[in-house]
Amino acid sequence: MVILKEEIEIWMDTELQNSTEQDQPGQLAIINGRLRMEEPTGNGAWPIIAPGKGVQLRHEGELIGKPTVLENAEDVDIEVVHKPSISEFDLVVSQDQMQVVLKTRFAAGTKYRIEDTEYVRELTVNVDAVGRIPPKPIDSSLVVQELDALGIKAPIFYDRIHAACTSLESQEVVICEGREMKPSVDGKVEIVCELTRRLEAQNDDARVNYLDRGKFNAVSAGDVLAHWYPPIPGEPGQDVYGNIIEVTPPASSRLRVGKGVKLIRNGTTAVAEVTGLPSYDYGVLRVNPQLVIDRDVSLVTGNVEFKGDVTILGSVTESLTVKAGGSVEVLDSVYHARVLSGSDVIIHKKLIGGTVIAGAQQPGLAKAEKLLQRAIRGLESLHMICSQLKKQPRLSVSDLKLRGDGYLVKLVLETKFPEITKTLAEVHELFSERGLQFCDEECLEFVATVRAQVQRFLGPAPLDMKTLEELFQAITDLQDLTNKLDDLLDSPADITVYYGQNAKMEATGDITVSGPLLYDCDVVAGGSITVSGECRSGSYIAGSAICAHAVGSKGLGVISLIVGENGTIGADTFYPGVKLRIGSVQTVIEQECHNQKFHVQEGKLVSSAFRRGGVRC
Amino acid sequence: MLRVTVVEKGPDAKLTLEGSLDMSTGDVLRDTVGGLDIDDLTSLTFSIGGLELIDSTGIGQLIGYHRLLRQRQGRVYIENDNREIEEILELIGVREILEP
């Protein structure tokens, strides 16, 4: 068969024309959620389908994960993969196995639908989010089962589990706890007192007082020094698995006490039995009532102040002060210094210059007490005499009605009782401000009251009294103050010294000079004054008695000896010029006399033999 | 009322007092003593036995004369034979200061 070229060309043109009209690619689209397909025409390419996110495509039952040529839309199943909600839990046991924590996690899911598209040759099937899928509660029993599976033995908080499982909010909650171990508490000793040997001096101004280095630390009897807190055993615990957690037994430390300390309250509190210096050495608490200064009290040591007893192995040197709540013993001498002691004072050698006070913290108190007692006796007589005078028929009281009874009081005071005024003036002077350097606040207040009361009898003040009742009240007030003064003075404290010169001594008890001489001193004793040797010049006042080997001297200085009205003054030898006063009776020795003891009998001074066998009162 | 009679003028003067020596009559005694030459007096004696009444002002006045004369090395004496007045003088202590 012959095919002509022309026929071939016509055929080719026809074919070409036919192919241009029919080579369209196939296309796919999603319309209203359904897959539509347009088949290709001619030699057009076939469409391709691929799954997008959230979509699963199955082609003839097989899941396709990559772009696939699609021949027939009916062959493809499109499945939307919704994002599910989350409702899950986890149980966490703490590291110490004391807690179980339930961790819940809730999260909403997402609902999708297929996204419509235009016709395209290569179609990726995507989805749109169209809704939320809420989480569901967790079944509590699952939690309980899990706890059981873990072997948890400790008590379970079921209510918390239920609440956490149904709240639909992610949370962490403790649903099981072990029992905490209670640790033991170690025994403890707590020292509550100051243990420093010497407390720093408090200086109010910027100046430094080199003599004031601070008080020696001391506690008073009865002060609480320490507490003991006994050990407290702990209690074992238990973890969530039921395992016992053992407890360490407590460390025990006891409060040990030594001399001067007492335990009370079942041994839990230590109190000082005595006043003194506390120490806590080698676990033993002690109080030493005695402070020992192993050298002179001098610029090196500074002043010494201590609540207890003080023993000085050397001397007390010029301008220094030793102040003790207890006794003071000086093994050597005291030179122009001050020794103030709440109790006895013993100076083994000399006292030269200076002041020694035993039993009273303020110089002058003991002397003032003696003077006031004497003055009060005189004032009582004054009152009695004034009362008698007013009853005298020949005494006109018309002037007293105008001027007040004080005029009569002053007249009799000046005429008949001048010594009362002198005595009270002396008390007033004793309590002047310059003499009150050792007075504390209570003492200062008291002294001011005494001064004011004494002042009522001095100068023109008595003229202010309108009636004798006022005089009586003033005397009563003064007596009350004197009684309080007596209370202020401590129980009798003695001074013992070997030798005294140009010094001042005051003791609420006795004063004894055991050596050869007491010279030009101002001495006041609540009890007696005993001088083994000579007592030359000065002033000596005692409550009960004064006795010496020799009193006075030939032409050297003035000496006065004063005792109370029931007292005695005795000596082996009295030299001329010695002034004696017993109560209100006084005399001056005119001639040297020996072995005499003076006392008052029926208002008159009498003498008897002074007993020998050692000088004693 | 007080009547003062100058018995002797000086140097050892003596005055007799009668009546009442008190706050209201003291001027009478004062004027009489003032009439004496104090500087010439060695002593001044008051005879007071005739007094019916005396008060503390009057006694004070007598003591004042004692102090005045003592400054001039003189002395005051009080003569009295009236027991009740004497008791007053003793109670007040006048005798003790006049006769040390």
Image (cartoon, rainbow, N blue to C red):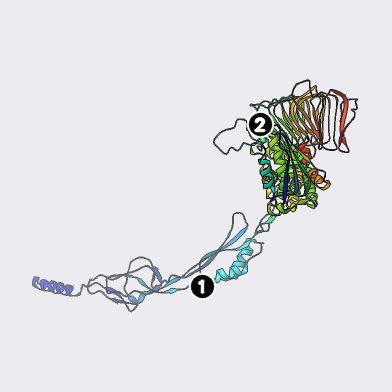
Name the image quarter holding the N terminus of chain A. bottom left
A18 relative to B75, above or below: below
Asked if A418 appears above or below A311 in the picture, the reply is: below
Looking at the rendered structure, whether the residues under marks 2 and 1 are on a common chain is answered as yes
- Report the residue that reaches farthest toward the bottom: A32
Where residue A16 sits, quadrant-wise, is bottom left
Give the letter of the chain under mark 1.
Answer: A
Side of B16 relative to A610 (left or right): left
Among the 4 quarters of the image, the one containing residue A614:
top right
- What amino acid is labelled 1 in the image? Lys
The residue at the point 57 percent across, 39 percent down is A204
Answer above or below: position of A322 versus A393.
above
Identify the residue under disc 1.
A136
Dividing the picture into quadrants, the one containing residue A547 is top right
Query: What element does badge 2 sit on?
Result: loop
Q: Which is nearer the N-term, disc 2 or disc 1?
A: 1
Q: CA gap, disc 2 to disc 1?
A: 89 Å
Question: In the picture provided, is A75 more to the left or to the right than A175?
Answer: left
- Residue at the (64%, 39%) spot, across then down: A433
Q: Is residue A172 visible in this depiction of the protein? A: yes
Viewport quadrant of the C terminus of chain A: top right
Q: Is residue A227 visible?
A: no
A441 left or right of A26? right
Q: Amino acid at mark 2?
A: Asn
**Within 10 angstroms of label 1, few (less than 14), some, or many (20 or more) residues?**
some
Disc on res. A303: 2
